[in-house]
Amino acid sequence: MMYNFEAYLTYENIYLIANWGVIPFWLMLIVAPNHGLTKVLAHSVISPLLLAIAYAFVAYKIYLDGNIFEGFNLYMGLENLYSVYSEESFLLIFWLHFLSISLFVGSWITRDAQKYMAPKIITILSLVLTYFAGPVGLVTYWIARIFFAKKISFND
């Protein structure tokens, strides 16, 4: 039984499950940021925990394959970065990392926008940009946030 389940968890399937799996969390942040279900699922540790489980599983498979140290070459230049991420397992682990951090940032944006009563359109725009372009969405929100928080702070 366990072998069948593990056989199903190919890199491609993990990628598809993670990709489609984060969409409901993003929709909750956009459509119903104050709903109890959003607070339990999207504003808690649940979504990062699910992605962390997938991340740990992929890391374990990399370890079993004996490729664990190949990922450290990415710091040696752009060509090595390309080489590292040309391997399916390392590309997937990067993508899980990106999905998790982006969702965390999206959750923070939503909570912070509520705190400073930022207009929903600014929050939605920032969330969409964060989903597609990570740091661009965060910076967009941060710039807009200055007007609602009435202060500029690099560490707030």
Image (tube, helix red, strand yellow):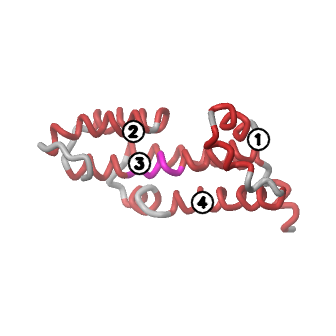
Q: What's the distance in space between the residues labelled 1 and 3, CA to CA?
A: 27 Å
Is residue 105 placed above or below 122 in the rendered structure? below
Residue 6 highlighted magenta (yes or no): no
Q: Position of residue 106 (x, y in %)?
A: 40, 46
Q: Earlier in the sequence, mark 4 or mark 2?
A: 4
Determine contact: label 2, label 3, CB under 8 Å. Answer: no
The numbered disc on residue 105 is 3
Q: Which residues are magenta?
A: 100-107
Q: Which residue is mark 4?
A: 52
Instruction: Indicate the amino acid at tag 2.
Output: Leu
First in sequence: mark 1 or mark 2?
1
Tell me whether circle 1 and circle 3 mark residues in contact (CB < 8 Å).
no
Assess whether mark 2 and mark 1 are in contact (beta carbons under 8 angstroms): no
Disc 2 is placed on an element classified as helix
Residue named by callout 1? 87
In depth, the one of 72 and 62 nearer the eye is 72
Residue 60 placement (x, y as % from top left)? 74, 62
Q: Quadrant of residue 152?
A: top left
Which numbered marker is on residue 127?
2
Choose mark 4 or mark 2, whichever is in front: 4
